Amino acid sequence: MDDAIGSGPDKVEALVVGGGPAGLAAAEVMSARGLSVLVVDAMPSVGRKFLMAGKSGLNLTKDESLAGFVARYGDGSEVFLAAVEAFGPEAVAEWARGLDEPIFTGSTGRVFPKAMKASPLLRRWLGRLAAQGVELRTRWQWTGWDGDALEFSTPDGARRVEASVVVMALGGGSWARLGSNGAWAEVFEGAGIPCQAFQASNAGLRVDWSEHMEAHFGTPVKGMSLTAGDVVSRGEWVVTSRGLEGGGVYEVTRAVREGAALTVDLLPDLTEEEIAHKLTRPRGKLSVSNYLRKALGLSAVQRALLMEWGRPLPEGAGLAVRIKTLVVPVVGMFPLDEAISTAGGVGWDALDGFMLRHRPGTFVAGEMLDWDAPTGGYLITGCLATGRAAGTAALTYLGR
């Protein structure tokens, strides 16, 4: 593939644009069935967001029933949900073991490589792809279409590629420094392919604190529950200068984004009646803060949150209700680029399965598609599942 743009397009059998987990999954499926596959990526190396996810352990999937797992994607497209059913938690675990990557299941059901990082698995995966004949090209930035050809900006100048089938897996609209900047959406819209606006998913929630909370910035919050709509999270989160961050917050992001009020239960293991009974203890000369510490065992950060959001404090049963349903005054979400993932992207009405209606033979996978998921293994599984589904659909398109 040494021809410049002026000498005509390069021709390949299968082209994958984007070297994240969705693109690599598509390449794996197609090359395993004998297709000659070229994978191109705009970054200097592939799988950068995948490697970043590995810094927190690489949560591949979650060990739960398939029905329960699929339900966590909410009202996702039937096409998307069918892809996850075809390559769900058990299949992901078996795939990792097939790469000689030992895995384990944590106490919450989340599945991780024993190495607790992504680099060993990615190396083995790339080794498998190389053995199947997959070719990689990095620093290839997709810029648009020219008829049947895809145009790229590369270190060697402009290039054009024609392929029998194309799988596009360019990512969503977050973590631009890792390659997912969502710039492709403008090109799609210009080509008449409808896209839904990107929205932050699994993102921090902004809160305007009073100066009294500064002493608690950086404090991890455990043992409480957050509720938004019908979503309840018992996960850990952190008080930061901008608001609330962490896994426990990410679980309720979607509901808050869609308009649900957010409340925190400071003592989820006690009922209102039990709290009210404990509050019958005489206060004496204790300050309100010390009284709450002694009577209820509230930590410093719990007491600070109650004072921040609950004043003026009612008494007796009313205080018990407030402790159980403390309203969090969310003023917005963290910036889109800081979100772990994004909702929005190519709308399902623009697709026939995973194939673009406007461009037969071109398929879309991963976070380019309009789907949403909580953290906890659902994101990576969704990317792997849609990548494999798109690759399989490309094979079917070719009669392979």
Image (cartoon, helix red, strand yellow):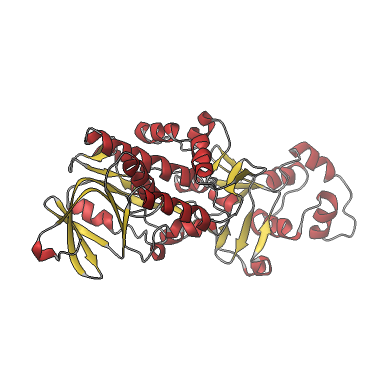
Image quadrant occupied by the N terminus? bottom left
Horizontally, residue 29 falls left or right of residue 152, namely: right
Q: Nearer the viewer, residue 230 or 307?
A: 230
Q: Residue at x 60, y 54 (%)?
A: 115
Looking at the image, the residue that sits furthest to the front is 131
Q: What is the x, y in percent for residue 80?
A: 38, 36
Above or below, comparing residue 329 to residue 140 in the picture: above
Using the image as rendered, state which of residue 42 and residue 108 is in the foreground: 42
* Residue 343 at least partly seen: no
Q: Quadrant of residue 353?
A: top left
Left or right: residue 222 versus residue 394 is right
Q: Is residue 193 visible?
A: yes
Image quadrant in which the C terminus is located: top left
Tell me residue 3's x, y (percent). 15, 64
Residue at 84% in and 44% down: 278
Name the side, left or right, on which 63 lies relative to 385: right
**Residue at 18% across, 43% down:** 359
Task: Find residue 323 and report its horizontal and vertical position in percent.
Answer: 70, 47
Q: Is residue 379 above or below residue 349?
A: below
Residue 163 vs residue 343, the one in the foreground: 163
Exactly how many numbered labels are in the figure?
0
The residue under the point 39% across, 63% down is 45
Q: Residue reaching furthest top?
A: 67
Rendered location of residue 317, percent (x, y): 75, 41
Query: In this rendering, is residue 232 above or below 334?
Result: above
